[in-house]
Amino acid sequence: MAEKKRRRLIYKRAAFLKATGNANDTLESLLKTALDTLATAKSRLQNPGSSSEKRFINYRLLHDGKNGGSKIYGCDLLVFLEGEGQSAIKIDDKAAEFQVNSIPAEKGAEFLSGSVYFGVRQNHLIVNPSRSLGLDDLERYLNWILTVRTQVLAADNAVELRHHIAEKMKESFKKVKDIEISAPVVMTPSPAVKETFDGDEEAEKERRKLARAAKRKGEAPPTKVVRQYPVTPAGQAWGWLKSAMGSAFLPHEINVQNLADTPDLEIKLSLSWKGKQDENDSDFLDAIAGHLRHVDNELDFTIRGKNGVITREQVQLFDFFNVSFSESGQPMPDDIYPKMAEWLDELINDGSVDP
């Protein structure tokens, strides 16, 4: 019996930066044309800059949706590091340390280090990324294979995998006023512990009072030792702030007396428009969806208008599904791609995305 694993599926909409000159061109049609000209998996290998990393589309096949639903073109993007071994630990109940060994792949084989499974229908995409290979990696590969490897798309054009704001949402949202992007500051605890005789102001006053009393009695003065735990601000948002302001203006670490009391810090960036937009609301929202397409879970954004707001959750569509896996540890194509097709049908039918 196939093992079931829970997988996150994400919806994206493909958009070309320029018109292709053919109204029938879609990402699905261009991708099929490109892959049909590359008969072998080796001909689809991309070296994205690393001397050993290779990316390629391995599987591609048109799948029927469940219960007679619409078809979807299922593909997978895989990555491996050429000649790299895999580390493994040897479990020993009596060992003070587990032994770590590197296991080389057998001759003519390589270890996969990441994967993205995706289904395409016209310009709709349903994507299941992995931790090591994401949506931005898929976008870069698609542009390479379309514009560089096969040239089915002009070199001065490109495809973007965007968030999608449905027409019914645009109709109820008027006049963009501002966009707010926010992100938490990650606090990284230091293993060091500092001890200081300085408490807060009131504690210090009390210590001095007790010290004077002890002196009059000829006793040793009391000391108040305060333990402090340094935490270092980090994360993507903190990196932005350091780039904008310079590290000289920002604290390198913050001392807390209890790690449970680490402060919750958040950075917010707000962009406001006071004048009239040159673009209409629909085009402007589409542009925002394109520019924010790679905003990940660490970041959040809110678009405010004259009569409401649009949040990241409304345009970053995703859901979780139980997917069957083969004994080799890969999602079974006859399960994951029909699930993608079925979910896409649901999104279109309920108006979450436009046809």
Image: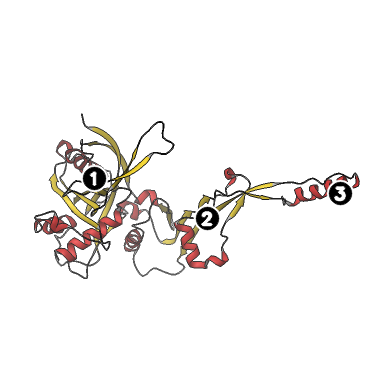
In the picture, the disc for residue 344 is 1
* Contact (Cβ within 8 Å) of mark 1 with mark 3: no
Residue 91, given in percent of the width and then of the height, sits at 36, 35
* Distance of label 1 from label 3 (alpha carbons): 77 Å
Residue tagged by mark 3? 212
Query: SS of the residue at dot 1?
Result: helix
* Of pointers 1 and 3, the one earlier in the residue sequence: 3
Tell me which corner region of the image, top left, top right, bottom left or bottom right, holds residue 179. bottom left
Task: Quadrant for the N terminus, please.
Answer: top left
Residue tagged by mark 2? 233
The kind of residue on which mark 1 rests is Leu
Q: Is residue 335 above or below residue 110?
A: above
Residue 52, given in percent of the width and then of the height, sits at 25, 58
Query: SS of the residue at dot 3?
Result: helix
Viewer-side residue, 43 vs 67: 43
Closer mark to the observer between disc 1 and disc 3: 3
Residue 282, given in percent of the width and then of the height, sits at 32, 60
Task: State the residue at coordinates (19%, 51%).
Answer: 120
* Contact (Cβ within 8 Å) of mark 2 with mark 3: no
The kind of residue on which mark 2 rests is Pro
Residue 103 visible in the current orientation: yes
Looking at this rendering, what residue extends furthest in the front direction? 95
Residue 84, given in percent of the width and then of the height, sits at 26, 52
* Of pointers 2 and 3, the one earlier in the residue sequence: 3
The kind of residue on which mark 3 rests is Arg
Closer mark to the observer between disc 2 and disc 3: 3
Classify 10 Å Cα crowding around label 1: few (below 14), some (14-19), many (20 and above): many
